[in-house]
Amino acid sequence: MSTVKEMLDSKGREVFTIGVSQSAFESVEKMVAVQVGALPVLDNTGRLVGIVSERDYVRKIIMKNCSVSDISVSDIMTKDVVVAREDTSVDKCMALMTHKKIRHLPIVEGQDLVGIIAVGDLMKFIIKQQSMTIEELQSFIMEETGGSG
């Protein structure tokens, strides 16, 4: 069974974050600049304290017609962050993200943020794994049948 560690080893471990005291507008600017849909939010000590997404921005600022200049990340972030560990199975992550209706899943080991995966990352990884399995099965069939298909 594939794990988050295998997926992070394949996709990379770079994580873009934002500080808890930065403005909500800065969070959106950063998401646009680095082309991500969510940023883990860290406190002054580097500890994960939340996650802010484009969805948070839309629901908590735009839909409530608030002024973006006075709103901080801490005002709009999701505080109860759902996380996974490197030894979590890819299937469990998919089930967790589906059940919790989330698109981004920070990966932690102890108190340390070591990665983040998105639904798109999961889909890409699963499709790659399935393609490899199909190729292996096709090779096996060709060998068993003497190459006649």
Image (tube, helix red, strand yellow):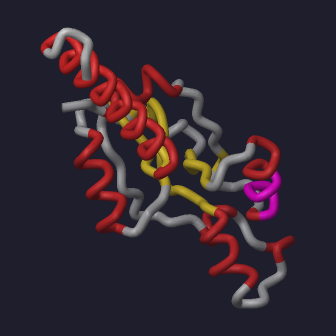
Residue pictured at 64% horizontal, 55% vertical: 37
Left or right, 101 with reference to 20: left
Question: Principal SS element in the magenta part?
Answer: helix
Q: Which quadrant of the figure contains the N terminus?
A: top left
Above or below: residue 81 compared with residue 141: below
**Left or right position of 21 against 120:** right
Q: Please determine whether, in this image, residue 149 is positioned above or below residue 119.
A: above
Residue sitting at 45 percent across and 35 percent down?
113
Farthest-out residue, left = 144
For the C terminus, the image quarter is top left
Left/right placement of residue 130 relative to residue 113 reads left
Can the viewer see residue 36?
Answer: yes
For the record, the magenta segment spans: 25-29
Above or below for 77 versus 82: below
Asked which quadrant contains residue 21, the reply is: bottom right
- Looking at the picture, tell me which residue is in the foreground, 48 or 56: 56
Q: Position of residue 99 (x, y in %)?
A: 29, 67
**Position in image of residue 88 (x %, y %):** 24, 38
Based on the displayed image, in which of its 4 quarters is residue 45 positioned?
Answer: top right
Closer to the camera in the image, 26 or 45: 26
Query: Is residue 71 covered in magenta?
Result: no
Viewer-nearest residue: 62 or 91: 91
Which residue is found at the position 42% from the left and 44% from the top? Answer: 122
Spot the residue most to the front: 148
Kindly indicate the quadrant of the structure image that contains residue 134: top left
Residue 110 visible in the shown view: no
Q: Is residue 58 left or right of residue 149?
A: right
- Residue 72 on image: x %, y %: 71, 65
The residue lying at 63 percent from left, 42 percent from top is 17
Q: Decide which of 79, 115 is in the foreground and name it.
A: 115
